[in-house]
Amino acid sequence: MEQKTYLIFGISRGLGKAIAMHLPEHTDIVFGVSRSRPDYLENNGNINWIPADLSNPVDAVNAIKDRIKDKKIDYFIYNVGIWEENAFTDDYNFETSSVAEISNLINTNITSCILNIQSALENLKQSDNAKIMLIGSTWGLDNHNGREVAFSATKFALRGVVHALREQLRPEQIAVSILNLGYLATSSKDENNSEVMVQEANSELIPLSDVIHALKFIIATSKATCVKEINMPAMGDLNV
């Protein structure tokens, strides 16, 4: 099997950690981006950590490009999403969100995403079947029930990026996809066992393994196909 190269963002914990550890084959090359150093690198020699603070988009892009240089990238996965203070709780209040908080959120969730995709295009064009996969949210879907203004705005923006970028890259046959996810089960002690995670979450959270399966499906498609969007709320999620 041909060795593939991944560029994965947000690998220090949660879904990003699960993607880095369970999506690539052990023979593949992984460039993993995060602000803090992941605690599992010693046992995963194929993962090349790139420290970068995505709230500073230009510096982050330069740091990442300096590491990947002109290497081929097969799969670009932007798994980044920060949110406002007290988001997803009754204490959230848009009126008290500071300018700094909103700016930081937009820089991390959107500006860095756009600039890093632009920076990696020449790397992606070297692949025979390149895929760009963005991790979105059900907060970016029409008529959701959430109140988090800036977070929702960035997740709607991700969908806009995907729609336009797909047209831009159609001649190169680089597929662009977004997974709009609901609440994730990121705190399970057995994150590799979907049955255990479903039982623990009472079907109100999405097992990380289900997201990995969705990404594997996208990767398995030929360049003749573009998986536009996958919406994945949990069965018991009433947000959408």
Image (cartoon, rainbow, N blue to C red):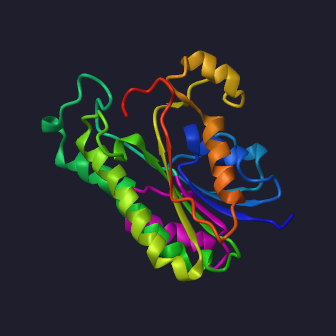
Q: Position of residue 71 (x, y in %)?
A: 67, 76
Q: Quick one: which residue is furthest to the front in this view?
A: 224
Q: How far across and down, in percent of the image, does residue 87 sit?
A: 30, 32
Residue 139 in the figure: left or right of residue 94: right
Decide if residue 172 is in sight here: yes
Q: Please state, as top left, top right, bottom left or bottom right, where the C terminus lies in the image.
A: top left
> Is residue 65 within the magenta segment?
yes
The residue closer to the viewer here, 163 or 153, is 163
Residue 47 x/y as whole percent: 71, 54
Where is 18 relative to 224, above or below? Answer: above
In this view of the protein, which residue sits in the foreground, 207 or 145? 145
Residue that appears at 33% across and 29% down = 88
Location of residue 190 (image quadrant): top right
The N terminus, quarter of image: bottom right
In this image, 169 relative to 108: left or right? right
Residues shaded magenta: 50-78
Q: Is residue 208 magenta?
A: no
Task: Please say if 233 is above or below 74.
Answer: above
Q: Residue at (50%, 30%) from the top-left corner?
A: 234
Q: Residue at x 34, y 41 (%)?
A: 83
